[in-house]
Image (cartoon, rainbow, N blue to C red):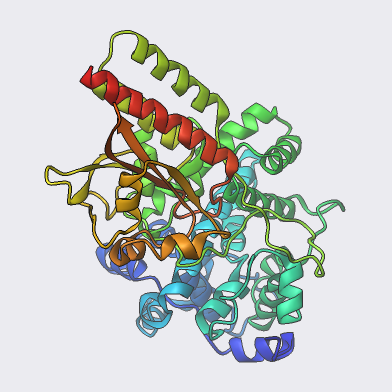
């Protein structure tokens, strides 16, 4: 796979561009003439799109300048240098990512873009807390942190698509012969981007003294990596502690600031079409969480595994999936559900508890209860507990002795994972398997008074957590409570 050296890839990619997001073009079309629009409006759009940001910076940095002229650090400065006419030409000549990158690579590309924007927002927030005179410079540099990976996804002919963990520098070194950060750094130097951007792409061990502005970019990147694995992990706690120490504040105060930044960055970029880091924040308002999740697209094959530091190249065994299970919320739901079953029972209130258990306790992105129709020929989606994109009007046929038909004949629960995947997925209706587009999921029959009512289906579609044995046991517990609720309803 490492058929080209770092120098060869740099030579090949330096002539290429990152593509433009269609949304950027549409947004620019709505703000009016570039000559009359405010620079803030223009740069706010450009900075959501690393392709557009990079194209403008590259064009401006390529222009001749005297030794006395300052370097170009931001989109604003680049547009002033180029002039609005040249910027309009530049954008008109760009290709759309939707037209030039295949579905699998584009899904990963947009994951990286979403992560970069989150990281940039966090870096900008830290800079403002430290009263930095030019926080937008940190935003711009952080937005371009993964430019090497983005360039290879756009122009690397699928070279990154067989990675087990795209963030693992050991695997990068083994398969490419260099790291993606090294490629980003080499390209930034080749394009004569600002010395600040180039320095932000240099390897940093996390320990040596460093310029505070550069340190904030590294902290923001580490934070965005940790957020992929969840907000209640040791990795996240360690990053937040470093941020608190850097900003001379309490960890609780730093966490609140980080949380707000994550939410704001997600609110501004729902058009990315991927689940943002903020969607997994604990205690997030349900309506807001759903607004982040509904309508999102996800990778065909998840490649971003999250926070892993200094993995040896010789140790590339696949990681066990990390469960984001929130035990405190789950236990609260179980106790409240048992109280309802023993006291005044209300189905809407009980089902709302079930939804909270699936979504906030078990951190499931998709979960639903599909019940038998009157003729017992289909399972029909009756209760959505998680993301309902594509599932609102779901009808699963019961024929050809498929998996669902078998489950209703002999009630049971199962967890599909690597060890049994082929056997289980072979029994799924083809259209349903294509729709769920995942190979780790949970299904359990729901029975009341000895009669099968339907099935609960659940997964974590759109992130890399998968489902482990602890998740399976908690799911079974929640489904048994759900069954008791329907028994109570009928009794």
The one nearer the camera, 412 or 151, is 412
Residue, x 19% and y 51% (percent of image)? 378
Q: Where on the picture, by quarter, is residue 319?
A: bottom right
How far from the left and from the top, in percent, is residue 46?
43, 65
Horizontally, residue 311 falls left or right of residue 330, namely: right
Rendered view: 195 above or below 375: below
Q: Residue 456 in the image: state x and y as whole percent.
A: 35, 41
Identify which residue, 132 or 210, lies in the foreground. Answer: 210
Give x and y (percent) for residue 220.
64, 50
Residue 79 seen in the current view: no
Q: Considering the image in quadrants, where does the N terminus appear? A: bottom right
Q: Residue drawn 56% across and 90% down?
A: 15
Figure quadrant of the C terminus: top left
Taking the spot 63% from the left edge, 67% from the top edge, the residue there is 164
Residue drawn at (60%, 48%) of the image = 229
Taking the view exactly as shown, the residue that stands out farthest to the right is 208
Q: Is residue 239 above or below residue 481?
A: below
- Hey, which quadrant is residue 96 in on the image? bottom left
Percent x, y for residue 479? 40, 33
């Amino acid at each position: 796979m490492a058929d080209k050296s770092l120098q060869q890839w740099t030579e090949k990619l330096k002539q290429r561009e990152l593509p433009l997001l269609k949304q950027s073009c549409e947004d620019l079309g709505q703000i009016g003439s570039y000559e009359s629009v405010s620079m803030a409006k223009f740069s706010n759009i450009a900075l959501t799109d690393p392709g557009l940001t990079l194209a403008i910076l590259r064009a401006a940095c390529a222009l001749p300048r005297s030794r006395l002229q300052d370097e170009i650090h931001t989109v604003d400065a680049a547009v002033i240098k180029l002039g609005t006419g040249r910027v309009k030409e530049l954008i008109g000549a760009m290709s759309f990512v939707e037209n030039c990158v295949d579905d699998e690579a584009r899904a990963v590309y947009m994951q990286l873009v979403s992560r970069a924007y989150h990281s940039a927002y966090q870096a900008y927030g830290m800079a403002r807390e430290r009263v930095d005179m030019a926080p937008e410079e940190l935003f711009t540099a952080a937005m371009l942190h993964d430019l090497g990976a983005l360039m290879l996804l756009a122009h690397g002919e699928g070279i990154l698509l067989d990675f087990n963990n795209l963030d693992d520098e050991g695997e990068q070194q083994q398969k490419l012969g260099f790291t993606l950060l090294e490629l980003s750094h080499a390209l930034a130097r080749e394009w004569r981007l600002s010395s600040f951007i180039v320095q932000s792409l240099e390897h940093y061990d996390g320990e040596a003294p460093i310029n505070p502005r550069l340190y904030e970019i590294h902290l923001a990147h580490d934070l965005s990596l940790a957020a992929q694995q969840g907000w209640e992990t040791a990795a996240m706690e360690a990053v937040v502690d470093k941020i608190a120490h850097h900003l001379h504040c309490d960890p609780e105060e730093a966490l609140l600031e980080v949380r707000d930044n994550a939410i704001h960055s997600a609110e501004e970029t729902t058009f990315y079409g991927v689940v943002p880091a903020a969607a997994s924040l604990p205690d997030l308002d349900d309506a807001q969480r759903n607004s982040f999740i509904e309508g999102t697209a996800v990778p065909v094959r998840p490649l971003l595994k999250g926070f892993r530091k200094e993995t040896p190249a010789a140790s590339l065994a696949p990681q066990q999936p990390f469960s984001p299970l929130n035990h405190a919320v789950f236990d609260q739901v179980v106790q409240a559900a048992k109280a309802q079953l023993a006291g005044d029972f209300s189905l809407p209130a009980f089902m709302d508890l079930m939804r909270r258990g699936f979504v906030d306790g078990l951190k499931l992105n998709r979960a639903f209860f599909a019940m038998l129709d009157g003729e017992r020929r289909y399972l029909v989606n009756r209760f959505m507990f998680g993301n309902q994109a594509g599932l609102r009007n779901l009808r699963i046929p019961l024929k050809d002795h498929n998996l669902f038909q078998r489950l209703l004949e002999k009630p049971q629960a199962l967890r599909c994972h690597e060890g049994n995947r082929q056997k289980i997925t072979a029994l799924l209706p083809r259209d349903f398997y294509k729709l769920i587009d995942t190979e780790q999921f949970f299904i359990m029959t729901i029975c009341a008074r000895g009669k099968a009512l339907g099935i609960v289906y659940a997964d974590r579609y759109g992130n890399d957590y998968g489902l482990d044995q602890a998740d399976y046991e908690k799911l079974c517990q929640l489904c048994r409570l759900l069954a008791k609720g329907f028994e109570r309803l009928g009794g």
